[in-house]
Amino acid sequence: MNALAIPCPSPLSRAPAHRLGRMAIAALHAELACSPKPGLVTPFSRGSHHDMDAGTFMRSLFALRGYFVAIAAQGPTAQRFASLRQLGLSAEQAMGAATGGINTHRGAIFSLGLLVAHASRLYVQQGRPAPAEAVCADVARWRDDLLDAPLDPRSPGQRARALHGVAGVREQAAAGFPLLQEVGVPALRAALAHGLDPATAHVQTLMQLIAVADDLNLLHRGGREGLAFAQASAREFLASGGVHAAGWSARLRRLGQAFEQRRLSPGGSADLLACSVFLLMQERMP
């Protein structure tokens, strides 16, 4: 299935849906462009991945444009999570067709898709964009549906979740995305308020997320030891001043080499960064 199989929005909802859909893609592109970031794909590095590069991500983003518009269009009238889940499954197929079966954005299809739908719902309901925290909290109204939704036990993230007994993105969504409300969004707001340019603010936010998130991608690739190494490395980077310290970029590139030697890739934290970027973007929607 390709991107054309994703339903188009109705004429009445087209304008806000298209704006939110474009913001979602822009947020994912901002995450890809964020550099340096340890273990992750950037325009300049494959990170810890041998099977994907920035071109793979760009093909995926192109295929997902219609999905984010469609889920924004359906968000205001959706009564149950199941009504949006099929859109997500179609988006996963579109992504796979564009990337040759490589999983570039599966986590973002779920998390960012939910946030786009609820940002759209609140926008239509209130006639203005909602604060980022309100969008996160609104997702929790589907708590039972989210926790009851079927999981794919074959996915690397779900295998790591079961093996290590940690909460995953589904539990984050059911709780109203506490990592976004308490870490991602405040960190990005603070970095921008401090006068950092967006690209540097994104790096700082990513490192703050890596420092605290039980990232299933890190658990899958490195187990508990790999997760602990990544979190401790991020905390050390932040304690030493983060992006406010001289030479921070060179330090992160060296840390990236250490991540690559261990095959570590904090993909879950990268998804949370993209979600944080989107949430602040949608606050400024006219």
Image (tube, helix red, strand yellow):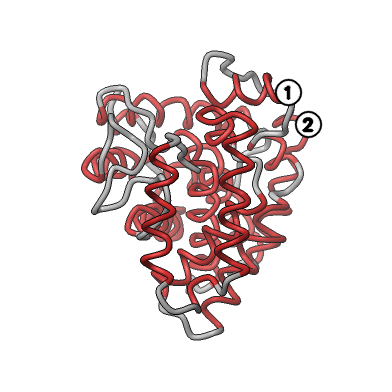
194 with respect to 141 (left or right): left
Mark 2 element type: helix
How far apart in space, not on screen, are marks 1 and 2 (Cα)?
6 Å
Q: In this view, does 177 lie above or below 222?
A: below
171 with respect to 62 (left or right): right
At 48% across and 54% down in the image, what residue appears? Answer: 274
Give, as a three-letter code, the residue at label 2: Asp
Label 1 with label 2: CB-CB less than 8 Å: yes
* Residue 128 place in picture, x, y as percent: 59, 70
Q: Name the residue under label 1.
A: 148
* Residue 16 place in picture, x, y as percent: 45, 60
Q: Please tell me which residue lies in front, 49 or 74.
A: 49
| Residue 24 seen in this snapshot | yes
Q: Which disc number belongs to residue 144?
A: 2
Q: In this view, does 152 lie above or below 186?
A: above
When asked about the image quadrant of residue 3, the answer is top left
Q: Quadrant of the N terminus?
A: top left
At 51% across and 43% down in the image, what residue appears? Answer: 113
* Residue 36 place in picture, x, y as percent: 36, 59
At 25% across and 45% down in the image, what residue appears? Answer: 54
